[in-house]
Amino acid sequence: MGSQKLGRHSRFTSLLNELKERKVLRVAIAYIVVAWIVMQVGEVTFTALKLPPWSQSLLVIFSLLGFPIALVMAWAYEITPDGIVEDHDGNPHSHGIVGRSRFENVKSNGESSLASIAVLPFEDMSFDQDQTYFCEGIAEEILCALCEVDGLHVAARVASFQFGGKSADILEIGRKLNVSVVLEGSVRKSEEQIRITVQLIDAHDGYQFWAGQYNHDLKDIFDIQEQIAQAVVNAMRLSIGDNLLTRPMTESTEAYDLYLKGKSYFTRPDKQNILFARQLFEHAVEIDPEYGRAWAKLASTYAYEYLCAKPNENVRHEARRISKIALRLAPGIPDSHIARGIAYSICQDFRQADLEFEISIGLQPESFSAWFTWARSKTYQGDVRKAIEYYQKASEIRPEGYRCDLIQMTMLASLGERKAAKEKAKEGLRKAKDWLELNPDDNRAWNMGAFALHRLGKVDEAKKWMNTSLVNSPRNSELTYNAASFYSLAGDVEKSLEYLSQAADSGCLNVSWLEQDSDLDAVRGNPKFKEIVAQFKG
């Protein structure tokens, strides 16, 4: 009996919410008020005009007959900026979007795409202006929650976060990211108190249509993130399952703060940043030993150190050991399987690596990180065709990114497919230029774009791009290694070996990639090249 009552109550609540959502109740109240006013006016004016008594009765009858018609119209149609349109809420293809709402994109062929949103990194409003990592982390958690909403397209983090801290026009953001709504916000963190302010802006007209402010203790941060994500989908008139908003696998706000800070370093993968990130992840798991997501990132720091530094068996052992812990604690998240996959890869157990990457993609088919890391693993394995295929998958998930296209360009050239390599060079260069418009300090874009320019025969411009990256970031070993490859392609053997020696001296040289890199073919037979590699391997 109790479950039946609960079911009836649930159905009644659901019906009531639906009536509210479709504005049926609002129309009913408005109709009653207007009808009452009309009848009051009619009583006075009909008498003054000496109309027959039955005319007032007729007015009452018409008013009563119009009431159910108004309710039906309110249920079936809605008033929009485009006029009165039919409400298709019952259509399974609408994914919960009412009619063609203001949040849908309209393509040139007349078809409408699903609701779409870009989440910008939140602005740091704290007194010391030292919470950027925390603000970005909060925005990213909300972004990840929104990614789980059926019928909602969410712009990738790397795409939307490029607009952080910039006074970019909302209409321009909407056009470049092909989204209809932009979510922006700010965070003010003071000791154990936090205030998060968020707003939704229509990317078609630039007007704010929803805003919210959340003032809580810091310990409530996970509840706040869920509340914001739920409020966003409600404001956009979408539906979301109760089980879709998942917490970051820890109840410790201190461990979570360290995790976010570690991620901010890990997104800038050079040796020093990887070591900084590791220290923060280590501290996070000390505070909460059950924090599986932090264990996964910690394992990845060891795997990437092994790949980007002098080969060290202890580092490889730690990658294996810690990735196993992450998988035990958090087997249901892609990060755990990605960490385990790359750990198997550096141990050259590529069969097991493939299984882990397959599982991670099964858990999240649109995971850029999974496809990108699997492509790297295939590169180390020497399976260039599969690497190209997986880099292409990653590129389709983040079509605004330039890295996957430019890596494919190099691989296609190594296979002798010059025409395909040239097309990838054009595509990658276009994306790099678009990226640099908003991120002129991204030295990797200058560095990798130089290869595309060289492939397209623009040698002088290519050298300028390469020089820009090296002048702006002289200590970045990844860029130094790329410079060695670039000057090898340009036929400058002396300069190529000079930069290769610098990369080796810094302790950062990816031997697996080095052995597959066709860009270094011009210097591979040089005695100095063999000497550098031998000394690095030790």
Image (tube, rainbow, N blue to C red):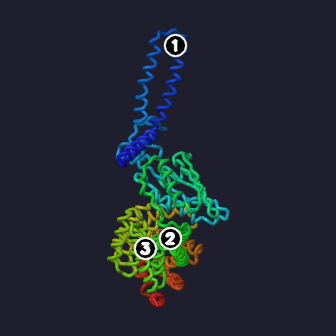
**Residue assigned mark 1:** 46
Q: CA distance from mark 2 to mark 3?
A: 39 Å
Q: CA distance from mark 1 to mark 2?
A: 85 Å
- 35 or 403, nearer to the observer: 35
Q: Nearer the viewer, mark 2 or mark 3?
A: 3
Name the secondary structure under disc 1. Answer: helix
The image quadrant of residue 330 is bottom left
- 366 or 174, nearer to the observer: 366
**Mark 1 nearby-residue class (10 Å; few <14, some 14–19, many ≥20):** some
Instruction: Answer with mark 2 or mark 3, whichever residue precedes in sequence.
Output: 3
**Residue assigned mark 2:** 450
**Residue assigned mark 3:** 326
Badge 2 amino acid: Ala
- 349 or 454, nearer to the observer: 349
Name the secondary structure under disc 2. Answer: helix
**Which residue is rendered at x = 43% and y = 69% of the image?**
335
Identity of the residue furthest to the right in this view: 127
Badge 1 amino acid: Phe
Q: How many marks?
A: 3
Can residue 447 be seen by looking at this rendering?
A: yes
